[in-house]
Amino acid sequence: MKKIKLNSEQMSISKIDGYILDPTEKYVSDLNEELDFGITILQSCHMLVFPPAFKNWHAWLFENGFSLDIPNPTNEFVSKFYGVEPLWKTAYSMGIVVKAENDEDYYIIMECSDKNTGFKHTQIILTMGGCM
């Protein structure tokens, strides 16, 4: 498992597809440390405009039978993607599963591609409280 800090300067674009995160890597993160910055990112989305990448998240929720109003993916459902493959991958975003460093919870992280004005390569925690 590889420990990461989201949106850190030490992450660099090294993949041909332009994404920083590798969906086949088993990432762990101290998400308690990430939450303040994660909340700030979501607030900026509300104040500016949601990047097109959020349509990919909403489509994934809908296609998998989860609520669009109150996203409710479960640990049981997302854990099978952990370190295996992305939840989705489009020209605008990629969704991956990250495990909490200090417990058994999983989080969905969306990385925006460079097609999202103002949010290029931004990594957004979509399940702030973890998965259910």
Image (cartoon, rainbow, N blue to C red):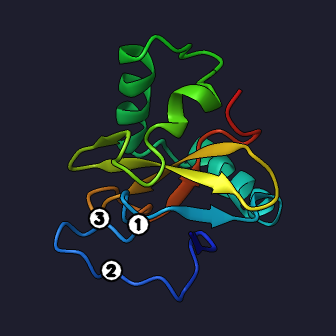
- Residue 26 in percent (x, y) is at 50, 62
Sequence-first disc among 2 and 1? 2
Give the residue pinned by disc 1.
21
| Front one among 39 and 22 | 22
Q: CA distance from mark 1 to mark 3?
A: 13 Å
Q: CA distance from mark 2 to mark 1?
A: 8 Å
Give the residue pinned by disc 3.
114
The quarter of the picture where residue 60 lies is: top left
Mark 3 residue type: Asp
Q: Are circles 2 and 1 on residues that touch, CB within 8 Å? A: no
Q: Quadrant of the C terminus?
A: top right
Residue at 49 percent of width and 43 percent of height: 49
Q: CA distance from mark 3 to mark 2?
A: 11 Å
Mark 1 residue type: Leu
Circle 1: is it few (<14), some (14-19), or many (20+) Cα within 10 Å?
many
- Residue 70 in percent (x, y) is at 65, 18
Circle 2: is it few (<14), some (14-19), or many (20+) Cα within 10 Å?
few
Sequence-first disc among 1 and 3? 1
Image height of 56 relative to 63, above or below: below
| Front one among 19 and 52 | 19
Would residue 35 be found to the left or right of residue 110 on screen? right
- Residue 12 in percent (x, y) is at 40, 84
Sequence-first disc among 3 and 2? 2
Give the residue pinned by disc 2.
13
Image height of 40 relative to 78, above or below: below
